[in-house]
């Protein structure tokens, strides 16, 4: 796939729809930072970096809501990639808005690192609008 961030988001979404316990994605610093934001905001479980063969991977443990003893619903309803490789989307601090009436988060890459839109707005920072998660 051409866009590694979109591939990571798609892998997480597909693994949750299939009911998997965890998912492996190829490691990079940006992917690890995005995964840590998802972990901090309680959208996924634990994040571990592991070396398999010649490459490093990130193992993301997925979270589910237990509806009954047999039924579980993924915590992440959907993920949407905003800034793509062909068209980068940048935002200023005043243009960062709540996602799904604050039921979701936006992930922004700022000069101070990758953070949620709420954190970026409080810090007075803008940056590349990576994705939305709800």
Image: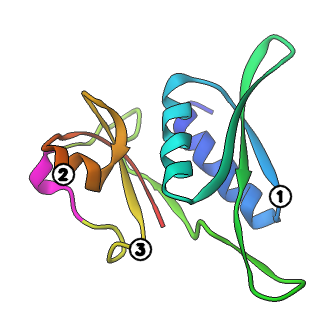
Residue 46: percent from left, percent from top: 68, 46
Residue 112: percent from left, percent from top: 27, 29
- Is 35 on the left or on the right of 88, as rendered? right
The boundaries of the magenta stretch are 92-97
Residue 108: percent from left, percent from top: 32, 43
Q: Are marks 3 and 2 in contact (CB under 8 Å)?
A: no
Disc 3 on helix, strand or loop?
loop
Q: Which residue is mark 3?
A: 103
Disc 2 on helix, strand or loop?
helix
Whole-angstrom CA distance, mark 3 to mark 2, is 17 Å
Instruction: Kindly identify which numbered label has been placed on residue 57.
Output: none
Whole-angstrom CA distance, mark 1 to mark 3, is 23 Å
Q: Which residue is mark 1?
A: 20
Query: Which image quarter holds the N terminus?
Result: top right
Q: Which residue is mark 2?
A: 121
- Note whether 66 is above or below 40 in the view shown: below
Q: Residue at x 32, y 77 (%)?
A: 101
Viewer-nearest of labels 2 and 1? 2
Which residue reaches farthest bottom? 68
Inspect this view and state whether residue 96 appears.
yes
């Amino acid at each position: 796939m051409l866009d590694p961030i979109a591939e990571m988001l798609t892998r997480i979404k597909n693994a949750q729809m299939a009911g998997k316990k965890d998912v492996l994605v190829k490691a990079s610093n940006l992917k690890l930072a995005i995964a840590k934001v998802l972990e901090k905001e309680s959208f996924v479980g634990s994040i571990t970096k592991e070396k398999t063969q010649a490459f490093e991977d990130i193992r993301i443990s997925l979270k589910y809501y237990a509806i009954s003893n047999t039924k579980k619903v993924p915590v992440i309803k959907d993920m949407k990639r905003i800034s793509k490789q062909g068209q980068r989307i940048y935002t200023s601090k005043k243009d960062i808005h709540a996602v799904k009436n604050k039921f979701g988060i936006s992930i922004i890459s700022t000069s101070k690192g990758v953070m949620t839109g709420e954190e970026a707005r409080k810090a007075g920072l803008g940056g590349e609008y990576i994705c939305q998660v709800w």
